[in-house]
Image: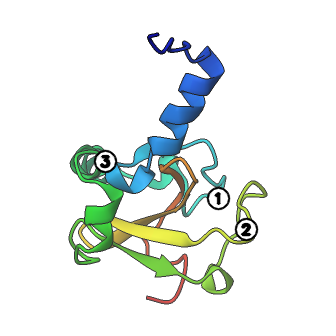
Amino acid sequence: MGHIKQKKSISDRLKSIEEKYNPDDHPPKFSLQFLVNHSDFCYDSLDKEQKVALINALNKLSHVTWAELRTTQRHGLGYEIIEKHVLRFQLPAELSVDSHIIAFRFYSKAPMLGFRSEDGTFYIIAFDCKFKAYKH
């Protein structure tokens, strides 16, 4: 007698897909949802050249996996971890206690600061073109 294979439910199939997804194997997704409203670090603090550099950096970063970014030089496409206590601005309330602040360079050595969520989204919280966000 042949074995009858039962179809998986939609929720079982979605759960299976979620279990296989590892954000380190994918490029970051980007969000400005939690960008601070501080005149030195907000989007409006950027000039036209810096805004173009931001778009170019996001384009480059969106083609490299998190795993690759982790092993790349911090002043290239890579990033560095910044301690929260050294920041000179109020962090968004949505930032979890165990989240790390990550700095990607986007305009020369000027960093965009943010945090990575569990799904691999990089939430940009500040742009530091004036190098005032922390001691560099």
Q: Which mark is residue 90?
A: 2
Q: Are marks 3 and 2 in contact (CB under 8 Å)?
A: no
**Labels 1, 2: front one:** 2
Question: Tag 2 or tag 1, which sits nearer the N-term?
Answer: 1
Q: Position of residue 77 (x, y in %)?
A: 24, 65
106, 31: nearer the viewer: 31
Question: Residue drawn 55% across and 63% down?
Answer: 40
**Labels 1, 3: front one:** 3
Q: Position of residue 41 (x, y in %)?
A: 54, 61
**Mark 1–mark 2 distance (CA, rounded to whole Å):** 9 Å
Q: In the figure, 76 relative to 95: above or below?
A: below
Q: In the figure, 14 relative to 118: above or below?
A: above
Q: Are marks 1 and 2 in contact (CB under 8 Å)?
A: yes
Which residue is identified by label 3?
58
Q: Position of residue 30 (x, y in %)?
A: 45, 44
Could you tell me if residue 106 is visible in this image? no
11, 5: nearer the viewer: 5
Count residues near mark 2 (Cα–Cα under 10 Å), then give few for <14, some for 14-19, many for 20+.
Answer: few
**Total marks drawn?**
3
**Mark 3–mark 2 distance (CA, rounded to whole Å):** 24 Å
Q: Which mark is residue 127?
A: none
Which residue is identified by label 1?
38
Could you tell me if residue 67 is visible in this image? yes
Is 132 displayed left or right of 48 in the figure? Answer: right
Q: Secondary structure beneath disc 2? A: loop
Give the amino acid type for the residue marked by disc 3 in the picture: Leu
Give the amino acid type for the residue marked by disc 1 in the picture: His
Give the amino acid type for the residue marked by disc 2 in the picture: Gln
